[in-house]
Image (cartoon, grey):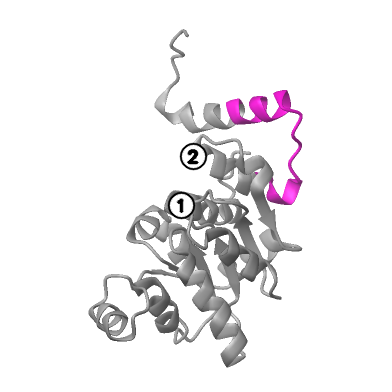
């Protein structure tokens, strides 16, 4: 293959052009309201399977953007996703990103209770006194805990991005969330990851600022 010389400022734009061309070649037409999210996930992963396995509840993108625009916070289950989410843009709308995985009280409670730190982190996040978007990219136990808190405590998160990657309970945990009345964006199957969770958050934020390149 020949090297394509692209100016640094044009690399992202060219990448999205190539994604669009590949989707056209495969005969895939993404719904307009979901296009910017799915394409940014593909951009972050170089995996076109996401064009088929990304799943959205009704009006999910609009609901998530309205939450972010009104100052909602984001809670994630990894410091990698925390690092990847554009905190400056989020702060411009009055929100911030939290990851409690490394907190001493979370580790202590996890050790005593036998729960994962991800599950304990969800319990801690429940105390945030404002709308929260949960962006889960690694731990299915976080999704299971969110489901249990909804079922037992009659509590509802504002929105769930459920894209944990892996094998044990990953698909079942995603199915649990899709069976609730909470709006969601989920990657069906085993694929996902912290980079995918961050990409979804950034796609929503960038669309609000007009930066979207799709």
Precedes in sequence: disc 1 or disc 2: 2
Q: Are marks 1 and 2 in contact (CB under 8 Å)?
A: yes
What percent of the width, then of the height, locates residue 156?
Answer: 61, 82
Task: Determine whether 81 is above or below 14 in the image.
Answer: below
Task: Determine whether 168 is above or below 111 in the image.
Answer: above
Q: Does residue 74 appear anywhere in the picture? A: no
How many discs mark residues in the rendered view? Answer: 2
Q: Main secondary structure of the magenta part?
A: helix
Q: Can you tell which quarter of the image residue 171 is in? A: bottom right
Disc ID at residue 45: 2
Question: Which residue is the site of mark 1?
Answer: 193
Which element carries disc 2, helix, strand or loop? helix
Left or right side of 9 for 20: right
Q: Where does the magenta region start and end?
A: 18-35
Closer to us: 127 or 181: 181
Residue at horizontal 43%, vertical 80%? 125
Q: Can you tell which quarter of the image residue 211 is in? A: top right
Q: Is residue 122 magenta?
A: no
Residue at horizontal 47%, vertical 63%? 90
Rendered-image quadrant of the C terminus: top right
Residue reaching furthest to the front? 168
């Amino acid at each position: 293959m020949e090297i394509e010389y692209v100016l640094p400022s044009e690399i992202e734009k060219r990448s999205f052009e190539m994604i669009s061309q590949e989707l056209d070649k495969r005969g895939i037409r993404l719904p307009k309201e979901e296009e910017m999210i799915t394409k940014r996930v593909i951009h972050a992963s170089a995996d076109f399977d996401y064009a088929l396995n990304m799943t959205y509840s009704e009006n999910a993108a609009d609901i998530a953007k309205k939450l972010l625009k009104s100052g909602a916070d984001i809670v994630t289950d990894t410091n990698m996703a925390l690092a990847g989410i554009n905190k400056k843009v989020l702060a411009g709308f009055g929100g911030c990103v939290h990851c409690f995985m490394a907190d001493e009280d979370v580790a202590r409670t996890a050790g005593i209770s036998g729960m994962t730190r991800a599950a304990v982190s969800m319990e801690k996040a429940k105390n945030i006194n404002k709308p929260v978007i949960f962006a889960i990219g690694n731990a299915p136990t976080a999704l299971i805990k969110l489901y249990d808190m909804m079922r037992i405590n009659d509590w509802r998160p504002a929105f769930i991005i459920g894209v944990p990657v892996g094998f044990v309970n990953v698909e079942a945990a995603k199915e649990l969330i899709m069976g609730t009345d909470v709006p969601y964006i989920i990657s069906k199957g085993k694929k996902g990851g912290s980079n995918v969770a961050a990409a979804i958050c950034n796609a929503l934020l960038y669309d609000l600022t007009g930066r979207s390149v799709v």
